Amino acid sequence: MKIAAAAYPLNWFDDWSDYEEKLGAWVAQAAGAGAELLVFPEYGAMELASLGGPDVAADLMGALHEVDRHKPASEDLHARLARKHRVHILAASGPVFGLPHAGDRPVNRASLFGPDGLIGHQDKAMMTRWERDEWKIVPGDGLTVFETDLGRIGILICYDSEFPLLGRAMAEAGAEVLLVPSATETLAGFTRVRVGAMARALENQMVSVHAPLVGAAPWCCGVEQNIGAASVYGPPDRGFPASGIIAEGRLGEPGWVHAQVSRDAIAELRADGGVLNFAHWPEQLGQIGKVTRRDARAANRDKS
């Protein structure tokens, strides 16, 4: 499949038609270049807070609720664009209220669409400190691997990618491609997600797609500054680049990054790669159960 990862800037919209025009242009550009799977970033939906006006967009709770208010219309728009261009789209994530397990707090939800409409949702599992302490976002209720015409797709939103067991669970459930939408305000934050996404590709012998927010949005509470580069990573082994980087954009530069990915290459590497990280994963468990701690300083004192 051909994948397009977005380095996506947030824009101010005076009305809904502005958003329709922007998203339509982005999808048309990627689809026109041959992309079959389009990946938008974490919290890219926050630009919809602008539709509530400056005071709403600048207020944390006001912005979260305003974005949630537009979720049904956003889903309809993404479904129409996926159908029109015959592509799969991971929509930019955003807050969603009203889930039974979440009470009056939102989850951070990314929705996946195909040519036939909505495929499903993935809610972020691991909250960063500011999501816990300031936004009070709550985790979703489980992970899903989506069986699609393009292959088996898993989604780990930003911080989720930094936790190996989540990626491993996806891989064991059949995921071949891992989508990693992100929103980070510092280079250090972007690097953490980048390292996590690359590590998940290495240890699970799969492809990961990193789509970040970029640029400034001083009018929107919580996503005022965003740093990143769109990239597609693979295991550094036969059939993939030695760097593990299949494609990458420039830091902070908006636009699409495209990569051609072969499911057969993933299967072949898992079966007969130069290393077999995916197959050998269970072998580490026996060692983990035998961790001991030894005070080398005491040993040296005994010698003296």
Image (cartoon, helix red, strand yellow):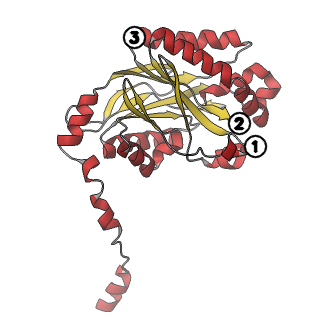
What residue is pinned by disc 2? 97
Instruction: From the top left corner, tell me how far across and down residue 264 is, in percent.
Output: 24, 29
Kind of residue at badge 1: Asp
| Quarter residue 196 falls in | top left
Residue that label 1 marks: 104
| Residue 16 located left or right of residue 243 | right
User: Mark 3 = which residue?
Assistant: 33
- On the rendered structure, is 270 left or right of 196? left
Of helix, strand and loop, which one carries label 3?
A: loop
The answer to whether 291 is drawn above or below residue 47 in the figure is below
> Is the residue marked by circle 3 packed among few (<14), some (14-19), or many (20+) residues within 10 Å?
few
Residue at point 56%, 47% (across, down) = 126
Image quarter of residue 64: top right
Mark 1 lies on a secondary structure that is loop
Image coordinates for residue 283, horizontal then vertical, percent: 27, 59
> Three-letter amino acid code at disc 2?
Phe
Q: Name the residue rendered at 38%, 43% in the picture.
A: 173
How far separated are the C-alphas under marks 2 and 3?
36 Å
Q: Which amino acid type is shown beneath numbered disc 3?
A: Ala
